[in-house]
Structure formats: structure tokens, C-alpha cells
Image (cartoon, rainbow, N blue to C red):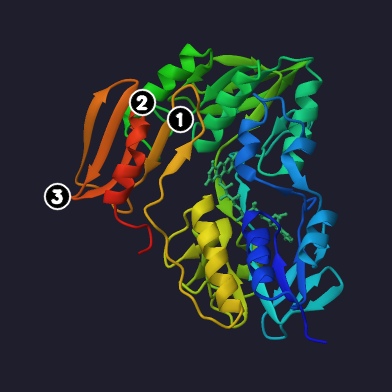
């Protein structure tokens, strides 16, 4: 019998690819392997669940068993792949060896912790990057009978979305970030400040330009020490201090990788024959976009390629919609450093246009009621990967 096509990872990239492949070929043996529970869920919904009081069960649309059934595939959960041997065309799960016909790496990205966590705090300091993490945080929140004080480290997209969502769910939220305003990588400062003001209006306590110095258990609470000497108290801490592509397995197997991900070309081919990569782990022709539309386009193109129709992936000018109901935000970050940002409007309703020296639009950022311009401006912007 033909060796299976093996997909490592059952996030939106791995499952999206498996679904596209099944549409094209109902017969091909497919095996999916994941380190987590393998439940089918939409990761973007993790940061909208607390305001709606959604249990982890409500966030999963199918269990791993349901996925296996639906896709007529083998799904192995809570299973960590330990090595890849590209020459022998097999993967290793500890002592077990599994040969593949083709291998696809959809291993996602891993939360980065800015420091080693003291052992006394491991049950109170969290990251939420998959449904299992959501389950653990949800349980911890429920121990605080309805309202917890949560300190969030980091004010990027993930930190901002959880802050707004937890606040909407009736929790007290404190945010700590070294930048001068939230969403510093997506928004010019005046728009970031508008979001910060909107957060403060909803009751979020914002500490910008502050670094965390240390955390320690202080009775029931955690004492969060900042670099200016302030000590904030919290029941729980949520770290949202960045994600890094999980390149370790690929790098150890000799594939070309960097901090931006596993390097692939526009056919999603890695530097090793028979191995492809997509999703948050992949740096496609120099770009690792880390959001859903690019990975969906990649899944579609790769399914065609793996079914015998080599297909290059293209990314359109797809803006990022930040889920912060306190102040709607949409951004299409420019691929290159703009000559200038042109700002229009006043907080909280602002437009920022990134332009090159000739006045060509390279990207944009919108807040408040200006988000309605997203379609018009996206049409005028360059494609991410044209
Ligand atoms: P993941 O979902 O991380 O999947 C990785 C898989 O690899 C998992 O199954 C994991 O168990 C498995 N794995 C890892 N290591 C191993 C191993 N050694 N062996 C076996 N399996 C392994 N994008 C948007 O476009 N819009 C949004 O609104 C949005 N909101 C977001 C909100 C949050 C809170 C977060 C964190 C992200 C959000 N994103 C959003 C980004 C988007 O969710 C991600 O780009 C996407 O889910 C990544 O999918 P993935 O399949 O590449 O990775």
C-alpha cells in the first residue's frame, strides 16, 4: 500500500489542507498528527470567547474523532513528532517510525515567554494559543467566581484582543507593554493611542512604556513588579509577548529555516524534496503573514500541487481586522518602510495612509468609524504576494 501523505499539525492550516485534498482525491491515505487534542476549532474565536461566556466545548466544532471520520483520515492526537528524516522519507515519534509519501509541516507558532517562570506561579500564569490553553485558562478564571483581576503582558494583536474580551466578560484587566501605545507594529502612534484611550474608557488599566521586572506569589495574588517600582496585583497573568514559528524540527532535519519560519517557495516547497510547509510556521517567498487568509490561500494552492497540478500561491491585499469592540481597528501594514504616514481625522476615528516617496499607497490603518474604508483602500493597495 502507498505510504500516507502526513500532515503535522491540525490547526487551520493542517485541517484546511486536508479538507482541500479530500475534495480532490477521496482515496489518498492521509495521516494527521498533532501535539494537542486535535479538536477542530477556529483560533481567532479564542479571543472572543470570554465576553460571550463560551465554554471550551462550544468553541470546538468537531472532536478529533469527528475530524477523522469527516476526512476519512487517521488523526493521532497528543502525539509529538520528535524527528524528520528527509532522506529516508520518514518521521519519528520517539521510537516509532512512520514513512510518508509526502510530508507537510503545519506546525504553527509558539508563544514566547520573556523570562523563565518561577514554579510557584505555573498554575496562575498562562498563554492562550490553542483550545487546550483556553480550557486551562477558562478553568483558572472560574476559580475566581465570576470576576478575576488579570494582568496581560504585551499589547500586540493577541494581548489587545484578550484584554478587550476579558473586560467584556466582566473581569478586571491590567495591560503592561513597553511601547508607547497598543498595536505598535500595526498602527502609527496616534491611532494606537486612540485605541489605548478607548481601552481606558472601558475600564482597562493601561501601563505603557513599562517593562516587567519580576513576578512573585504573594498569598492568593501575584505581585507584578514593573521597572518604575510600581507593584500591581493580579489573580492571573496572561502572557501575550509574541509568537515564533515552530522551526525546531525542520531545522534539526537540515531544512532551510530562519526566525521568520521554514523557508518555502511559492509552491510551498521546503528545501527538502517531498516536504512542504504552510501556515504560521512557513515563510513563503520571504513573507510570513501569520493570519488566516494567507494560510487558506496556501492550503488551496498546495492541495492542487499535491494532486498533480503545480500551483503557485498568491496573497491579495488582505487587511487584518483586529477584534477590539472598544474601538474597531483594521490595518494593512506596508511591506516596506513607507516614506511617510498621512494621517486624517481625529481620535477615535482616524485614517493613516502609508505612502512611498511618489505618493503611492503601500498600506493603511483605520480606527473607529473609518474602518468602513477598508474595502476601498485594500483595492488600492499592493498585493502581499502578487
Ligand atoms: P496552529 O493553529 O498553531 O497549529 C499548529 C499545529 O501544530 C497544532 O495542531 C499543534 O499541536 C501542532 N504541533 C506543534 N508542534 C508539534 C509537534 N512537534 N508534533 C506534532 N504536532 C505539533 N488571524 C486572522 O486572520 N484573523 C483573526 O481574527 C485572528 N485572531 C487571532 C486571535 C488569536 C488569539 C491568535 C493566537 C491568533 C489569531 N489569528 C487571527 C491568527 C490565526 O489564528 C493563525 O494564523 C492560524 O490559526 C495559524 O494556524 P496554523 O494551523 O498555522 O497553526
Residue that carries the numbered disc 3 in the rendered image:
357
Residue 190, image quadrant: top left
Comes first in the chain, label 1 or label 3: 1
- In this rendering, position of residue 157 left or right of residue 20: left
Location of residue 368 in the rendering, given as x and y in whole percent from the top left corner: 38, 25
> Residue shown at 36%/35% (left/top)?
187
Front disc: 3 or 2: 2
Residue that carries the numbered disc 1 in the rendered image:
178
Residue 58, image quadrant: top right
Q: Look at the picture and state if 148 lies above or below 60.
A: above
Q: CA distance from mark 3 to mark 2?
A: 28 Å
Location of residue 191 in the rendering, given as x and y in whole percent from the top left corner: 34, 28
Few, some or many residues within 10 Å of mark 2 (<14, 14–19, 20+): some
Residue 351 seen in the current view: yes
Q: Look at the picture and state if 307 lies above or below 42.
A: below
Location of residue 237 in the rendering, given as x and y in whole percent from the top left corner: 66, 27
Secondary element under disc 2, as helix, strand or loop, is helix
- In this rendering, position of residue 182 left or right of residue 216: left
Front disc: 2 or 1: 2
Front disc: 1 or 3: 3
Amino acid at each position: 500500500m502507498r505510504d500516507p501523505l502526513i500532515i503535522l499539525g491540525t490547526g487551520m492550516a493542517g485541517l484546511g489542507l486536508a479538507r482541500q485534498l479530500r475534495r480532490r482525491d477521496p482515496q489518498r491515505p492521509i495521516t494527521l498528527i498533532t501535539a494537542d487534542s486535535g479538536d477542530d476549532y477556529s483560533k481567532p474565536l479564542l479571543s472572543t470567547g470570554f465576553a460571550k461566556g463560551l465554554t471550551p466545548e462550544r468553541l470546538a466544532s468537531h472532536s478529533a474523532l469527528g475530524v477523522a471520520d469527516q476526512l476519512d483520515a487517521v488523526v493521532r492526537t497528543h502525539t509529538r513528532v520528535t524527528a524528520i528524516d528527509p532522506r529516508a522519507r520518514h518521521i519519528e515519534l520517539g521510537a516509532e517510525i512512520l514513512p510518508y509519501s509526502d510530508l507537510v509541516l503545519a506546525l504553527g507558532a509558539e508563544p514566547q515567554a520573556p523570562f523563565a517562570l518561577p514554579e510557584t506561579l505555573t498554575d496562575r500564569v498562562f498563554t492562550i494559543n490553542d483550545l487546550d490553553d483556553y480550557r486551562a485558562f477558562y478553568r483558572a478564571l472560574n476559580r475566581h467566581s465570576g470576576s478575576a483581576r488579570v494582568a496581560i503582558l504585551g499589547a500586540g494583536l493577541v494581548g489587545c484582543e484578550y484584554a478587550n474580551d476579558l473586560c467584556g466578560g466582566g473581569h478586571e484587566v491590567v495591560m503592561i507593554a513597553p511601547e508607547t501605545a497598543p498595536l505598535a507594529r500595526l498602527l502609527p502612534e496616534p491611532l494606537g493611542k486612540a485605541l489605548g484611550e478607548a481601552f481606558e474608557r472601558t475600564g482597562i488599566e493601561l501601563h505603557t512604556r513599562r517593562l516587567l521586572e519580576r513576578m512573585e506569589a504573594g498569598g492568593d495574588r501575584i505581585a507584578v513588579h514593573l521597572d518604575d517600582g510600581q507593584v500591581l496585583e493580579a489573580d492571573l497573568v496572561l502572557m501575550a509577548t509574541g509568537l515564533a514559528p515552530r522551526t525546531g524540527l525542520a531545522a534539526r532535519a537540515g531544512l532551510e529555516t530562519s526566525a521568520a519560519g521554514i523557508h518555502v517557495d511559492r509552491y510551498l516547497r521546503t528545501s527538502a524534496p517531498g516536504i512542504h510547509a504552510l501556515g504560521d510556521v512557513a515563510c513563503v517567498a520571504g513573507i510570513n503573514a501569520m493570519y488566516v487568509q494567507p494560510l487558506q490561500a496556501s492550503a488551496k494552492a498546495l492541495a492542487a500541487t499535491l494532486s498533480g497540478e503545480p500551483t503557485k500561491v498568491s496573497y491579495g491585499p488582505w487587511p487584518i481586522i483586529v477584534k477590539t469592540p472598544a474601538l474597531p481597528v483594521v490595518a494593512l501594514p506596508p511591506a516596506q518602510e513607507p516614506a511617510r504616514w498621512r494621517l486624517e481625522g481625529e481620535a477615535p476615528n482616524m485614517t493613516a495612509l502609508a505612502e512611498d516617496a511618489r505618493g503611492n499607497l503601500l498600506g493603511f490603518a483605520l480606527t473607529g468609524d473609518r474602518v468602513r474604508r477598508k474595502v476601498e483602500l485594500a483595492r488600492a493597495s499592493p498585493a502581499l504576494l502578487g
